[in-house]
């Protein structure tokens, strides 16, 4: 079972209904390489479309075993943590 907590706050962006209607309309979008994007879209920084990504062939390479992935994730997860110790200063190992 997974628990999910969502917290939010009400924010008033526009007091003006006309401005809110404009921002939510297609008139507020700008043309970029024959695509309509928001004026704050990061693609404005690109002069041209990036080349398409080559997809890897899923049959060419099988995924590593789950235990290998989990052990690698655990190694990265705890890499910079100090080793656990008990009250007497001796190292104790988690099994």
Image (cartoon, rainbow, N blue to C red):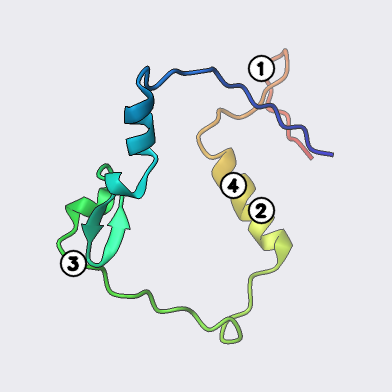
Tag 4 near tag 1, CB within 8 Å? no
Please tell me which residue is depicted at 39% across the width and 25% down the height of the picture.
Answer: 17
Residue underneath mark 4? 75
Please tell me which residue is depicted at 25% across the width and 67% down the height of the picture.
Answer: 34
One can see residue 41 in this view = no
From mark 4 to mark 1, how far is it between C-alphas?
Answer: 23 Å
Mark closest to the chain's N terminus, 4 or 1? 4
Residue underneath mark 1? 89
Please tell me which residue is depicted at 34% across the width and 49% down the height of the picture.
Answer: 26
Which label sits in the foreground, 1 or 2?
A: 2
Residue 62 image position (x, y, % from top left):
63, 78
Left or right, 82 with respect to 20, comes to: right
Left or right, 31 with respect to 57, comes to: left
From mark 1 to mark 2, how far is it between C-alphas?
Answer: 27 Å
From mark 2 to mark 3, how far is it between C-alphas?
Answer: 41 Å
Question: Which image quarter holds the N terminus?
Answer: top right
Tag 4 near tag 2, CB within 8 Å? yes
Residue underneath mark 3? 48
Residue 84 image position (x, y, % from top left):
66, 26
Residue underneath mark 2? 71
One can see residue 25 in this view = yes
Which label sits in the foreground, 4 or 1?
A: 4
Please tell me which residue is depicted at 27% across the width and 42% down the height of the picture.
Answer: 40
């Amino acid at each position: 079972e997974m628990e999910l907590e969502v917290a939010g706050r009400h924010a008033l962006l526009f007091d003006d209904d006309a401005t809110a209607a404009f921002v939510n309309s297609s008139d507020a979008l700008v043309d970029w390489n024959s695509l309509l994007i928001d004026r704050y879209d990061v693609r404005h920084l690109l002069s041209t479309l990036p080349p398409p990504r080559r997809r890897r062939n899923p049959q060419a390479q099988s995924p590593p075993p789950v235990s290998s992935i989990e052990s690698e994730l655990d190694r990265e997860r705890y890499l910079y943590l100090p080793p656990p110790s008990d009250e007497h200063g001796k190292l104790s190992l988690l099994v």
